[in-house]
Amino acid sequence: MARVGILSGSLEGIVTGHKVLDLFPEAELHLITESAEMGLLGEGPGIFSRWPLVPEHWVSGLGAQTPGDTSTAVRRSWLEKAMATALASRGCTIHLRTRVTERGENGSVSFVGAGLAGKGSIEFDKIVEATPGSNSSKSWEGGVCFPDEPSPTQYSGIRTDGSLEVWWCESPPISATWIQRMTWLGEDQQLPSRETSIGESYPPRHWLIQLYSNPRACVHGRAERASPDSRVHVRPLSGH
């Protein structure tokens, strides 16, 4: 059984985890993040052109946040939380509040996590680092409002509760009373559609093939890096 480590709690990291388990259901999967929570902390763009964005089994349930027939936006933090919960229910161990301190050439990862015994190391057959959009230099401002009359802009979407999610680079495109303000670094405000597959080029196909044929051939202490775009079986990392 291959052991795969994902060093990111971003949407890219969550998507990678689901893709790995779709192809290799028996894989031992670990997701390591310094965050204290998956999703719900902070907010990013949730605009889309078509729903659903991902296969149904990737999402545990959005409840009242589930987009309706006329919705063109979803609360991204809730989507990430629901996808992370589904990933954990599929057997992935999510290590919260855990910082990687060293990466070895043999695929080992040393860490410091929460708690008195929260440090040690794990040896992986494959290590993946999914880089979030914070590496982008393009800065965006966002806001959520309940306009008297919805007036969609180039970068906006309507959530299921009727609120309007708007993003801009310089000044707000509409005059509104904002109930939430947000900031984000990235290139595109729209989540990929299911047809283009959210995170479609990630993880790289070549190492999935290698992992299937020869897990140990994928190690070499290197991580694949995603292109830029931010409990059930979830615990701080402890000794393995």
Image: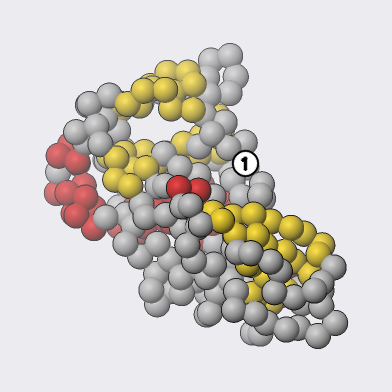
Residue shown at 74%/66% (left/top)? 144
- Nearer-the-camera pick, 94 or 153: 153
Does residue 130 appear in the picture of this structure?
Answer: yes
Tally the marks: 1
Q: Position of residue 176 (x, y in %)?
A: 82, 72
Q: Position of residue 162 (x, y in %)?
A: 77, 77
Residue shown at 19%/33% (left/top)? 220
- Nearer-the-camera pick, 45 or 116: 45
* 170 in relation to 24, above or below: below
Q: Is residue 103 left or right of residue 186?
A: left
Q: Position of residue 102 (x, y in %)?
A: 36, 23
Task: Specify the quadrant that holds the C terminus.
Answer: top left
Q: Position of residue 189 (x, y in %)?
A: 54, 67
Does residue 29 appear in the picture of this structure?
Answer: no
Residue occupying the far top of the picture:
116
Amino acid carrying mark 1 in the image? Glu
* 63 in relation to 223, above or below: below
* 42 in relation to 61, above or below: above
Residue, disc 1: 37
Residue shown at 44%/74% (left/top)? 194
Q: Is residue 89 left or right of residue 166?
A: left
What colour scheme has been applied to the protein in the rendered image? secondary structure
Q: Quadrant of residue 160?
A: bottom right
Task: Specify the quadrant that holds the N terminus.
Answer: top left
SS at badge 1: loop
Residue shown at 81%/78% (left/top)? 147
- Nearer-the-camera pick, 232 or 162: 162
* 45 in relation to 148, above or below: above
For disc 1, the neighbor class at 10 Å (few under 14, some 14 to 19, many from 20) is some
